[in-house]
Amino acid sequence: MVPKSLRPLVPYLKRYRRGLLLGGICVLFNNGVWILFPQVIRKAVNGLNGGVTREKLATYALMVIGVALDAWMLVPGWVRGETTPHSARNWQRCTWKGKGF
């Protein structure tokens, strides 16, 4: 499964396989969220062209806010209760476990 040229790294990477797996899942999830964002906007615009109701407006607003929050929480260095949208945009200033990047 591992290419021959990378086999010498396997003993070193075994120690970090859980973190690598979780990181890979987060990368896939983050990409999925960014793909989903334009789809939600398209669905909201098309849905509101047929007529605006309070329920439709609330549903689409919550969908957009939900996708935006998911995308924000998957920014590298996001720390619950510490990272703000401004610091997430400037990822050099974010901290991870109390240490700067």
Image (spheres, rainbow, N blue to C red):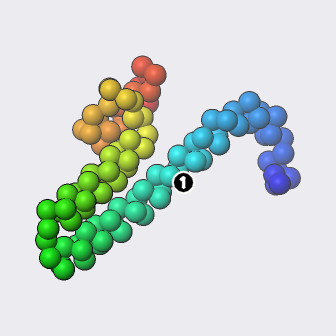
Say if 66 sits above or below 23 in the image. below
Say what amino acid the circle numbered 1 marks. Answer: Leu
Q: Quadrant of residue 46?
A: bottom left
In the displayed structure image, the side of residue 28 where residue 87 appears, left or right: left
The foreground one among 88 and 51 is 51
Relative image position of residue 1 (x, y in whole percent)? 83, 54
Label 1 SS: helix
Q: Say which residue appears at 64% left-offset and 40% top-offset.
A: 20
Say if 99 sits above or below 31 in the image. above
Q: Which residue is mark 1?
A: 28
Relative image position of residue 59 (x, y in whole percent)? 25, 59
Q: Say which residue appears at 67% left-offset and 35% top-offset.
A: 18
Q: Quadrant of residue 50?
A: bottom left
Whether residue 5 appears in this view of the structure is: yes
Relative image position of residue 35 (x, y in whole percent)? 42, 63
The foreground one among 55 and 94 is 55
